[in-house]
Image (spheres, grey):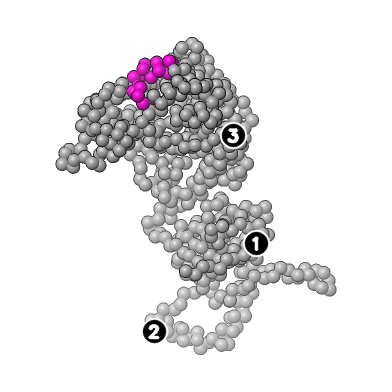
Amino acid sequence: MATEKAVSMPVGVTRLKYSNRVVLKTILERSDGGLGLVGERVVIGGWVRSSKEVMVKDPLPPSPSPSPPPKTDAGTGEMGPKDASFMEILQSRIPFFRSIMKVLGGGNHNHLRENSEQGIPRPPPPSIAFLQVSDGSCVSYLQVVVASAIASPCQLLRTGTCILVEGVLMQLSELGKHVIELKVDKIRHIGTVDHEKYPLSKKKLPFEMLRDFSQFRPRTTTVASVTRISNALTFATHTFFQNLGFFHMQVPIITTTDSEGLTEKFSVTTLLGKADKTEKPTTIKDTEGVSLEVIKSAAKEKAKLVQELKESESNKEALAATLQDFQKPNEVSQLKAREKSKPGTSLKANKVNFSEDFFSCRTYLTVSGRLHLESYACALGNVYSIGPRFRADCAEQVAEKLMIEIEMAFARLEDAMSCADDFFKFLCKWVLDNCPEDMTFVSKRIDKTRIDRLQSMIYSKVEKITYTEVVDVLGKVSDQKFEVKLQWGAALTAEHLSYLVEVIHKNPVMIYNYPIGVKPFYARLNDDRKTVAAFDLVLPKARILISGSQNEERLDILSSRIKELGLPREQYEWCLDLRRHGTVEHSGFSLGFDHMVLFATGLTDAVDVIPFPRSYAKANN
């Protein structure tokens, strides 16, 4: 197979190592906008964002070769004639070619006209296609000029068309937003588009419609910017923790343990495919006589009811009652956990013997990796992980989230809180320093306050306040009537958090020492025996970005907590072993990566920043 001859690259332009293509960012984000590269030959590839075709009445002249740099006159020392653009050369030569055609081509002209009159189609008039091309490396696009003699415009003009072309960078005659264009003299590839079926053929599709086309969303400017910002945040995470001596590791996606004790989980099994097809399919249940489908349906209806009541604002008592129902954490979950702990309950009810399953026991998609991180923190010191976590909760925005989790040995709650504060501010600064073009776009198209907001986070002081102090402060508020009255021991609602962060403190808030019933079972019990050493970092819009805790290192207390909640002890024996053999104080936290991307971009829905979001009844690809 013959290979393409490599095109030599000018200084300052980076050619990809494994192809002969130049990334547009290295051209368009130069300080001179690319003017220093005029006259250079490059190969670029990308997708057409918009286009137009300009007809040329007279035949096109041969493509001029790039003009050499202007030379000084040997006698006067003055500069010679300036380089002319392609269009200027074309316009200057049209009269000459018209004269040639009149002298030499008159007969041919009449012959073409006679043939046309006899039904033979006249060749299409020459034209020039002007394409705005993006390759995803930056917000900006490059204008690409292709004459019809090089390629038929009908192949190039459709939005979404992929092209790989070679040509010479030229200066635009009229300088505007862009100062250069690429004059193409060789086509290497064209990927055509079915205009009627291609969803991005329409202008300015709303996010709601784009969600149904995850495979094409990255081609939009907004989603491309979000992706580049997300990439920068991932790199920043590795940079921050590697510089501090943390070790990166992966935790298992499939686990036998409910890492938080009382959460909705996805079961992993191969038994359904082996069921007798002649029997009526049965639904795997998590509790005796209670189908998961029934639980999901009820949760979905309840969430729908809450939304309708909020929109109507006509029955605040009903809304308050429904929300209060949501604030009874763990009641149903604890019942389900106790039922699950009964040997053989689900097996007998559903005739499913998990001892015959792939893992010979019941397994789930992991909810949190912090318990697994404990094992390595208690051997290596400080560790972190980045990976997906799963919750089978209909009330959640998405079922699959990307989480950044850390665990530190010989560390207490205060240490974890300080690390979380530093990490959050590091991420804010990194985005501003490394994504200036994308952040400018975000500020123009999504949220004009976004850059100022991130800058203020870097230098603002995070207020630290206990849960008990929060209840006292909100209980004294007289100018705001909360839909759900806050009582000590209940979970804080989004309304409570919004008022606390946006009205009272006007800054991020770190709440710590929560009641024992609203945090994971492994959070360390405080001396008051009512609260645990856990914390949340809350941002504006009531978004909890980071949740963390000092973990219980005392064997007897952790064993008691497992028994109180009715959790199956055999699932946690490996965690208890860490307390039996060489126990150590350790702390850590989890940062919702998707929430950080939302905060950095100003978007509000997690499904718009996750490449392939999974939510209730939604898993299209």
Question: Which mark sits nearer the N-terminus, 2 or 3?
Answer: 2
Identify the residue shown where x is 33% and y is 33%. 363
Rounded to the nearest angstrom, the CA distance separating label 3 from label 1 is: 40 Å
Q: Earlier in the sequence, mark 3 or mark 1?
A: 1
In the image, which disc is placed on residue 245? 3
- Using the image, determine if residue 217 lies above or below residue 449: below
Instruction: Name the residue rendered at 56%, 34% in the picture.
Output: 246
Q: Residue at x 37, y 47 (%)?
A: 621
The residue positioned 49% from the left and 11% from the top of the image is: 528
On the image, the x and y values in percent for residue 387 come to 46, 38
User: Marks 2 and 3, Cα distance to the nearest angstrom?
Assistant: 83 Å
Crowding around mark 3 (Cα neighbors within 10 Å: few <14, some 14 to 19, many 20+) is: few
Q: Position of residue 132 (x, y in %)?
A: 53, 58
Residue 466: image x %, image y %? 53, 17
Q: Amino acid at mark 1?
A: Pro
Span highlighted in magenta in the image: 556-572
Amino acid identity at mark 2: Gln
Q: Secondary structure at mark 1?
A: loop
Q: Residues within 10 Å of mark 1 (few under 14, many from 20)?
A: some
